[in-house]
Amino acid sequence: MSKIKNAFSNGKAFIAFITCGDPDLATTAACVREAVKNGADLIELGIPFSDPTAEGPVIQGANIRALAGGVKTKDVFELVRNLRKDVTVPMVFMTYANVVFSYGAEKFIGTCEEIGIDGIILPDLPFEEKEEFLPTCKAHGVDLISLIAPTSENRIGMIAKEADGFIYLVSSLGVTGARSEITTDLKDIVEHIRSVTDTPVAIGFGISKPEQAAEMCKISDGAIVGSAIVKIVEQYGKDAPPHVGEYVKSMKDAIRDL
Amino acid sequence: MTNPAGRFGIHGGQYIPETLMNAVIELEEAYNHYKNDPEFNKELSELFNEYANRPSRLYYAEKMTKDLGGAKIYLKREDLNHTGAHKVNNVLGQALLAKKMGKTRLIAETGAGQHGVATATAAALFGMECVVFMGEEDTIRQALNVYRMRLLGATVIPVKTGTRTLKDAVSEAMREWTTRISDTHYCLGSVMGPHPFPTIVRDFQAVISKEIKEQMMEKEGRLPDAVLACVGGGSNAIGSFYHFIEDKDVKLIGCEAAGRGIDTFETAATVNTGKLGIFHGMKSYFCQDEDGQIAPVYSISAGLDYPGVGPEHANLHDIGRAQYVPVTDEEAVQAFEYLSKMEGIIPAIESAHAVAYARKLAPTMDKDKIIVVTISGRGDKDCAAIARYRGEDIHE
């Protein structure tokens, strides 16, 4: 068991996603610290990938900017070592299977344990393929986070039963990015999940406004926000950290007392 | 523990977002049902024969054989199919399957445009909506095919991300599929992507080797000594190889696009230069850097300009059953010109990669040996680009 459950021990969790190295790693570090200072309960660090097939245009753009800046996987590990000097909230990596595979699963996941990464989210690693990394993750106490989608239907029980850390519930069809409205009947899905497991459920994809975060947290244990934060980083570049902090505060305030 | 589906040795699998899992499971179940359904197979062979002009000819290239002075060369004329390439075999199969599944909309990626044209054609025939994703760079290289797709009623979306070529078109088609699954079938154009696509596409393309075998027995009374085909994702190659895999005396040779050479970064020769990875739903060989970032590959041929290779080819390479050889742009262009002048057949620049290797191989073999070269498509679409390569600017 990792520390991820701590993120859900202070009421509803606000989970902030940031692409590492956009526009540079120093800015990423400052954004993470601002997000934590302003109430983020868990940090998702995106390791850039050349072809992020689950991402919408906003996070695709962040990946391209980060890679153009020359960020390597080993630099992201250094960033985490630096952050762990003072950041205590749980942190997870979000990247693609090939980033882990090409680095070597044992080396990558072993390093995660060593530097204090609590889990890994791989959107292109469904339940059927999790054996690729799960034994290594278990050996190192790093949670391999499971995703459940609006189309999961008969698969929900099977996935939820074996889920570690928290369950990432994808709010709607499609790729990441802000949506004006989330129409999926998530309440039923969350109830189904809760009937088979105590693992916390956080909802992501499409959430950008405080009202949306509140709405999602009323039916689940937390809200995950990526594209809206990445957009702030895109807009303000190196000056982004205080703006990210301000945004995180507005989001956390909206769910704090639920 | 669930047994991972669709493996070829260590390759293949289903590395896709959870959102798509039930869609590929539904597809697999439908395919397993219909592949043994006599009615489905009857409809498909009628489409193949009456609509797509199958069986395609196995043509003895006598002038080319004499000119090269070695093995006897036969050309498998997939370029004579309706829409001008082997792509129609797979598309008619998948479109018919999609129709049986109650889907009303087809989406597809395309590189050279041949798969997009074939998909737009099937959509027109079956009265389905069609959206084709094509790298912006390829819409310029293959402007004629963009027009053909539009003429057939399809919407062509130029993809402006990444290298703006085939790989990005695949990514964008996958993204589109996650947004709309219930009425949409993703008509993948090659033996790649998540299971069951590599198997479905292979089975529909296997008609190529089934016919070669029958035609060769009829003409020569024996099997060929080697079968050559170009490999991008590898659908015409697996189609040409499939019924020969158990015939160990038949050499199977895939011709990869080396671009400006396998010792340069401007290459798309995946088996020769790539390493094992996970991308676009499958484990296979990919051109990538040490961090697993997919490489911006290059080939003069938009249809071979892809950083990966189908998982069954990766396995045929691993077990030594097939050989994968690199062919450069310059060799392919020379072969494009050679076959045009020698046999009066203008091959697709993709197929010209296989012709180029046949020109090297045939003279090293005795005159009683036989080579089959699959001409996967016709070259009209490439004339403007090859003219530009030779420094001539023509207006279509």
Image (cartoon, grey):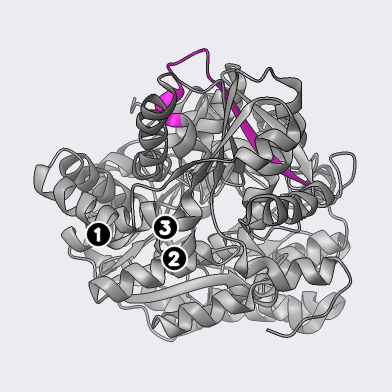
User: Element type at marker 1?
Assistant: helix
Q: CA distance from mark 1 to mark 3?
A: 11 Å
Label 3 resides on the chain identified as B
User: Element type at marker 3?
Assistant: loop
Q: Residues within 10 Å of mark 2 (few under 14, many from 20)?
A: many
| Of the pair A21 and B149, the residue shown nearer to us | B149
Counting residues from the start of the chain, the first of labels 2 and 1 encountered is 1
Q: Residues within 10 Å of mark 1 (few under 14, many from 20)?
A: few
Q: Residues within 10 Å of mark 3 (few under 14, many from 20)?
A: many
Q: Is residue A169 above or below residue A85?
A: below
Amino acid marked by disc 2? Thr
Q: Report the magenta residues as a range.
A: B242-258
Q: Residue furthest left?
A: B39
| Of the pair B221 and B160, the residue shown nearer to us | B221
Q: Is residue A34 visible?
A: no
Do marks 1 and 3 both belong to one polypeptide chain? Answer: yes
Q: Quadrant of the C terminus of chain A?
A: bottom left
Amino acid marked by disc 3? Asn
Amino acid marked by disc 1? Glu
Q: Single out the mark in the foreground, 2 or 1.
A: 1
Q: Which residue is mark 3?
A: B81
| Of the pair B21 and A188, the residue shown nearer to us | B21
Q: Which residue is mark 1?
A: B50
Do marks 2 and 1 both belong to one polypeptide chain? Answer: yes
Q: Which residue is mark 2?
A: B83
Residue located at (29% from left, 53% from top): B93
Do labels 1 and 3 touch, CB within 8 Å? no
